[in-house]
Amino acid sequence: MPKLRIGLPSGSLQELTFNLFARAGYKVRATSRSYTPSIDDPEIECLLLRAQEMAHYVERGILDVGLTGKDWILENGASVVEIADLSYSKTTSQPARWVVAVPEDSDVRTVADLNGKRIATELVDVTRSWLKDQGVEAEVEYSYGATEAKVGAAGLVDAIVEITETGSSIRANRLRVIDTMLETTTRFIANSQAWSDPWKKQKIQRIATLLVGAFQAEDKVGLKMNVKRGDLDAVVNRLPALKNPTISNLLDESYVAIEVIVDESTVRDIIPVLMDAGATGIIEYPLNKVIY
């Protein structure tokens, strides 16, 4: 039986990735000491790896596909096929940002002020390339962790390039962002030779379709309701639909049924408005996948 080897990110994204696969229809399980999770598809083999290393192993063909950030694809200079953009992260569904930060009381105000300075980051090659494009010459060193602690009172470096989602850690360490270097999201990537293999390509495409569908269903819900035909236009005009609503006839010819997908965050505001417009029997239900 042919197999597709897939790399899943360990660490902070592991649980979120397993949950995404579950919504896509795949049950992935791993013990605390295991780097080879089980999955309920005999055609797939899984391996847990740090996201920082994923693109390297996919490019070499050790893995057929994997999930990693756009930032680590660039840092590895990896030649891979980007199949899908899945903008999930530890805390938000927005892209994470690699920012240039300095102490609040630093005299560095712009990127140009970093000339001759020392900068610590995990994203060394991307930072060096970006600074070169900015016409800035600075010393960039690899940070093995606790990057925020190396600037400020410790005085080990003058600035850092660090990833942030909400900015809370930057503020907590009394740092000031002077520029955004890069926005990054999680990508589903494939090895170019695997992508050229007909069986693997079809398998990859099917997995990607389900993952994207599961991701697109996040924060969305379905609404069903009954509406008198005379109130139909008033109700439809108040629906912020993902697509045009589905309208079905009922046995009672004076009513129709409406079904629509909406953002979950808007439901509490929409339902009272729909009731005022004449909707009755409103049902809200969760979604696992939304596939266009």
Image: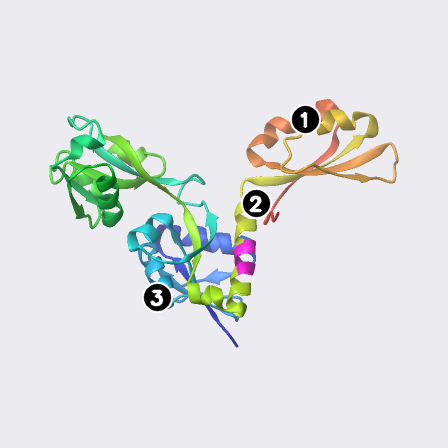
Instruction: Tell me what residue is drawn at x 55 percent, y 45 percent.
Output: 216
Of callouts 3 and 1, which one flags the residue occurring earlier in the amino acid sequence? Answer: 3
Q: Secondary structure at mark 3?
A: helix
Q: Is residue 247 above or below residue 230?
A: below
Amino acid type of the residue that numbered disc 2 sits on in the rendered structure: Ala
Mark carried by residue 164? none
Asked if labels 2 and 3 touch by Cβ distance under 8 angstroms, the answer is no
The answer to which quarter of the image holds residue 146 is: top left
**x and y, in percent, of residue 17 in the image:** 45, 53
The answer to which quarter of the image holds residue 226 is: top right
Point out the frontmost of discs 3 and 2.
3
Closer to the camera, 131 or 36? 131
Q: Which residue is mark 1?
A: 238
Q: Which residue is mark 3?
A: 60
Crowding at label 3, few (<14), some or many (≥20) Cα neighbours within 10 Å?
some
Q: Which residues are magenta?
A: 205-210
Q: Which residue is mark 2?
A: 217
Q: Secondary structure at mark 1?
A: loop
Closer to the camera, 27 or 102? 102
Q: Is 147 situated left or right of 23 in this image?
A: left
Distance from Cα at disc 1 to Cα at disc 2: 21 Å
206 drawn magenta: yes
30 drawn magenta: no
Magenta stretch, overall SS: helix
Asked if labels 2 and 1 touch by Cβ distance under 8 angstroms, the answer is no
Of callouts 1 and 2, which one flags the residue occurring earlier in the amino acid sequence? Answer: 2
Crowding at label 2, few (<14), some or many (≥20) Cα neighbours within 10 Å?
many
**x and y, in percent, of residue 253 in the image:** 88, 35
